[in-house]
Image: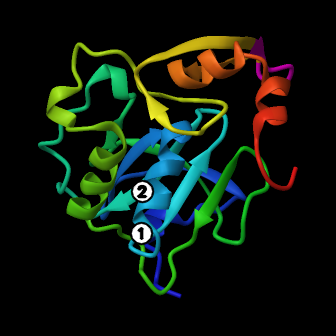
Amino acid sequence: MTAVPASLRPEAPIGMKYADTWNAVATPNDWGRCVLDALKDRTGAVLEDRALRHMVWFIPPGRADGWPTPEPLRLTVYRAGDGLLVPRLNGYRGVNVWLRTPGANGLFTDPATLRWAIEGVVGPLGQAGGRSPVVVCHFCAIPTRDAQAIDEWESFNTGTPHVRYACRSCLNATGGDRGHLRDQRKGPR
């Protein structure tokens, strides 16, 4: 296992740590899962904060300073001095967990490769401003800007609002009815 800097090793099972020898890029966890799939084995450590609903990739300091972070993408860059809630590597089993611990690929994800994967999922970062937010269709799991909310609820534990979306194709095929799509799928159920 690769050495993890002290700035990412909390004393308690989970703790606030501050960027110094690392920076990080956070994506919403809905379309962030598509980024993780695109990266495959080209990713370093990845953290998921289920309360904030984002996934975090660690990068060398300063390597995303010029990245645009348009509001519709809900993209966050953690720079020197920014705080991030981090669990111990042996795994905190709450809302904050390591999806990939620093291993053979190390702590860092190559920033150019990470940006390539992000832009492959949501389009060019520089062109996202002023556009609709990117959401993931509940039915086909594809990121889209052309979606309609089909279900809204509030978490009993945190009071956090949640929304499910359907892209235009799936909405037309199902009318937003999750049971209807299940009946239309082929193969094992």
Whichever of labels 1 and 2 marks the residue nearer the N terminus, that label is 1
Name the disc covering residue 119, or none. Answer: none
Residue 90 lies in what quarter of the image? bottom right
- The residue segment tinted magenta is 153-158
Q: Which residue is mark 1?
A: 43
Q: Which residue is mark 2?
A: 57
Q: Residue at x 27, y 68 (%)?
A: 110
Q: Amino acid at mark 2?
A: Trp
* Above or below, 107 relative to 168: below
Label 1 vs label 2, nearer the camera: 1
Residue 97 percent coordinates (x, y): 67, 55
Residue 10 lies in what quarter of the image? bottom right
Mark 1–mark 2 CB contact (< 8 Å): yes
Q: Residue at x 41, y 64 (%)?
A: 39
Magenta segment: does it hold 161?
no
* Above or below, 105 relative to 67: below
* Above or below, 175 relative to 167: above
- Left or right side of 122 for 104: right
- The kind of secondary structure the magenta stretch mainly shows is loop
Disc 1 secondary structure class: loop
